[in-house]
């Protein structure tokens, strides 16, 4: 979010609400997180044989385990995007625009 602080400062200076800015950041992050989760799921299916040799007492493509892992990764990823966006919203727009 440090790279986008200027953009967020401009949006806030032009009257965008905090909720709209956070929603914008989350929407963009959700697209990237979804692509990563889809790639991970595809990789898990492709590596099913290797995973079966390493994971004990769990099926390689157990839907409950896979779902929990994907949900945890999605939640952590989106939280990692929300916190910097909220921090950037607290910055004075004039300070950001002067840089």
Image: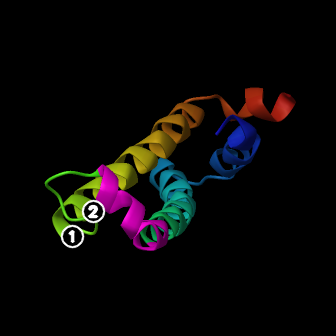
Colouring rule applied to residues = rainbow
Element on which disc 2 rests: helix
Residue at x-position 38% and y-position 68%: 48
Which secondary structure is most common in the magenta stretch? helix
> Residue 92 location, x and y as percent?
65, 29
The quarter of the rendered structure image containing the N terminus is: top right
- Distance between mark 2 and mark 1 Cα atoms: 5 Å
> Residue 52 location, x and y as percent?
30, 61
| Residue 83 vertical placement versus 46 (above, below) | above
In the visual, does 41 lie left or right of 66? right
Residue at x-position 68% and y-position 45%: 13
Viewer-proximal residue among 93 and 32: 32
State the residue position of label 2: 66
Viewer-proximal residue among 97 and 61: 61
In the visual, does 21 lie left or right of 5? left
**Residue furthest left in the image:** 57
> Residue 65 location, x and y as percent?
21, 59
Element on which disc 1 rests: helix
Report how many numbered discs are placed on residues in the image: 2
Residue at x-position 32% and y-position 50%: 54
| Residue 17 vertical placement versus 43 (above, below) | above
What are the residue bounds of the magenta stretch? 42-54
The quarter of the rendered structure image containing the C terminus is: top right
Point out which mark residue 63 bears: 1
In the visual, does 31 lie left or right of 92? left
> Residue 68 location, x and y as percent?
23, 57
In the image, is residue 40 part of the stretch drawn in magenta?
A: no
In the image, is residue 43 part of the stretch drawn in magenta?
A: yes
| Residue 9 vertical placement versus 35 (above, below) | above
- Whether pointer 2 and pointer 1 mark residues with C-beta atoms closer than 8 Å, the reply is yes
């Amino acid at each position: 979010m440090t790279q986008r602080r200027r953009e967020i400062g401009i949006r806030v200076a032009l009257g965008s609400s905090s909720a709209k800015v956070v929603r914008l950041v989350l929407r963009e992050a959700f697209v990237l997180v979804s692509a990563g989760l889809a790639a991970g799921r595809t990789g898990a299916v492709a590596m099913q044989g290797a995973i079966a040799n390493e994971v004990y007492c769990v099926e390689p493509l157990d839907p409950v385990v896979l779902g929990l892992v994907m949900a945890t990764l999605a939640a952590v990823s989106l939280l990692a995007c929300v916190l910097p966006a909220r921090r950037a919203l607290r910055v004075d727009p004039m300070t950001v625009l002067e840089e």
